[in-house]
Amino acid sequence: MFRFASAAKVASIPRDLLLTALPALNRLPGNSSCSEVRSRCYLTAAAQLPVRFRGRERRATRVLNCPVVPFGTADCDSRRFQRTDVPKPDTPGRPESRPLSAGRRRGLIGLALVLAAVALWAFGSQAVSMDALRNRLESIQKLADDNTLVAGLAFVGLYAAAAAASLPIGTALTLLGGAIFGVWMAVPLVALGSTLGATGAMLISRFFLRDWVTDRFGERIEPVQKRFEEEGAYYLFALRLTPVVPYFLVNLALGLTRVRVWTFAWVSLVGMLPAIWIYANAGSVLGAIDRPADLVSPAVLISLTLLGVAPLAFRWLLKVPRRKVLIGAGVAAGVLLMGSTAAAWLRYRTADSMAIPVVEFTNADYPEDPTPRSIHHGKYTGRTLTLNRRDETHFDFVFEPQHPHLARIVFKNVDVSLMTPSLPEWTKDKSALRKVALTDRQWNRQQVRFGGVGSRHLEVTGGDGFEAKRLYSADLVKNSLEAGRWEVMLYVQERGDKALYYQGWFQFPLGHYRRLFEQNTGLSYLTNGWRLETGCRPEGVRIRMDDLRRVTREAEARCGYDPAEFVFASGEQARRRRAVVAENVLSWKDLYDGRPVRFAAFEAPGRYSFARPQGNEYQRMDTFERALVREIASRADNEVRNEIELVFRSSRSPGVCRFIVSGFRWDRLPQAGPEEYPRGLYMPMGIAVPPFFQDYDSLLASPPQRSPYVCLMLNEEGEWLDHRRIGVDGPILHRDAQNPNRAHLYLMSYERHMLVGHWVIER
């Protein structure tokens, strides 16, 4: 125990406050001088005094100007001060934790109750429902997608404000950003917000809170400041890599040093990027969960493993000498550069003859396939592809048999440039038109029929004779996926219709694809190809329809639309009905009232799957407003053609959704009744795109880049809307069987699984 000399001088100070200096005294060396002991006692006690006694070291010395000596001795330099009745802290060198005051505990409890009430209000009684949580997240994602710039700036501002205020919610915000914006957009947003916030916190600490930070965190930030003075920016980089020291404490501590603002900002940015990517990636993966079973999916497990392993790896990195770290980083950068170069070479390598593997699925592997299958399906599998180049654009696709009963099938002299994205001349000088035209050209299905046995485009030899006699149609398909995803489909005729007996998926070489793209468009693949390989959609680009056609006459048309009309299906939609997940959808209005309607998603290599169903945004079109009919002069051929525009509004959100189909000839539309609608003009969305289904001879006669056809969805300001996310894949148009001045227009859903509306328009 200690006693106090000159007790009268400290009569107004509680004795237990002075005793708080004892843990600090225990850390002093045994040969510490009396002045060192006295100073340590003064500083520690002053930090614990009530507000009216707090102040700088000079003021504390005036208040506590008294020596402190142990019982029974006057020589304070010869003994280490010990106190046996007070336990030492568990971790030497760290300040003892103090319990929260009653007021703080009440405040935290109140805050928790408020947050719980907000969550209950936001999610209602369905808070534990996965569908409710998913729908709520999708509504937030939709809001962010519709207002990308505003949402991004708001997120950056929120993150910067939270970081500047030293609120410990950075991890939660990063996960949320990944779930809402996706990893590749969330990383730059979080990096910008966290850097601005950290720099703001550092400046606040430097110019406004220097004394408070020193008093409150003095012992915790002293080692950080000392290491920074010794090692400089490298130590800051190491601190940003690892959570050993909380980020907010680093900001406050370095505010008391002489670090330059620019150095602090860029080193913090670089050091935080790995952790930002890991947390944003985890957020994007968690945000894509549709059902509880997805929690144990490989993507989720890998992301959660990274969250746990990364801090341990970064902490180990701090123990490695700086020289070794820099050498290792240089070696790693070199290896990464060499690996990236090798990967790019392998990805884009080409040859005049290339062997390409073919992926095949059994009935058990692919039960969701909506294509009618032959009774012979699965009997003729086992093929590889040899791709032989004839000239700059023409190839032979040789499907080699791996079993003796299979035939060798060759697609001869195919002009692949007609199945590779191209641009009409009148769009090449317009950036917005280029983006939309290339995106829809790549992300629409193009299935080309080459005929059957006896076709001049096919060669069928060998095998047991079944394919040489029965092959009815052989098709090559460019799938509505990223660049190079192709498939081959072989049909026989059964019961008066064609039935699929073989289907295989393969990757068309990206090196050839890149060369054909540059040849078709005159654009650099380096700056444009990433859109085609990643599926980036040009949401929000502004389209001037006058750049595509010139209006010569416009009128509001009489249009019949019955929301209570029963949903009907024929042809492809009748076969695909099982690819729709919807309950009690009887009429068109049931699609637009907000009930869950989901579709089997189209995934690599080119198959449908219910593992992660595709949603829609039909509520943006729940109120049909009017129809407009125009006569136009197309930029493609300057001929007089027709255009129809349907205008929709939403009862739940502001804004207009315009569906425009243009460049067709009204008088050349097929005449049919609604029950025969598959006979109509059956087209995808986009600018100068080919039909979904087409024979090779007609493709040769009418290359896509010459087509005057245009079909877009725009808002009231002419900004492009992502029709795939809305859930519209294209229109069907035909004239009425009795009245040629009356046209029937149908909208097809995502991947043409069903019809989502029927409008009857008179001109």
Image (tube, rainbow, N blue to C red):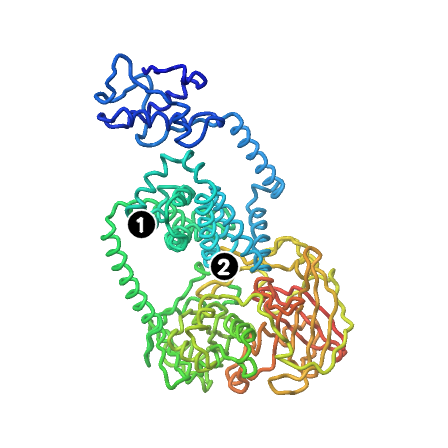
The residue located at (76%, 68%) in the rendering is 560
Label 2: state its secondary structure: strand
**Of the numbered discs in the image, which one, if any, rests on residue 232?**
1
Q: CA distance from mark 2 to mark 1?
A: 54 Å
Task: Find residue 749 and report its horizontal and vertical position in percent.
Answer: 61, 64
- Whether residue 573 is visible: no
Q: Badge 2: how crowded within 10 Å, few (<14), some, or many (20+)? A: some
Q: Which residue is mark 2?
A: 609
Give the mark, 2 or 1, whose residue is nearer the N terminus: 1
- Horizontal and vertical percent position of residue 471: 46, 77
Residue occupying the point 62% across, 75% down:
544
Apparent side of residue 109 relative to residue 467 in the rendered image (left or right): right
- Say if 141 sits above or below 465 in the image: above
Q: Quadrant of the C terminus?
A: bottom right
Q: Is residue 667 visible?
A: yes
Q: Nearer the viewer, residue 742 or 9?
A: 9
Residue 398 at x, y = what percent?
Answer: 37, 78
Q: Is residue 273 above or below residue 710?
A: above
Front residue (pair 327, 419): 327
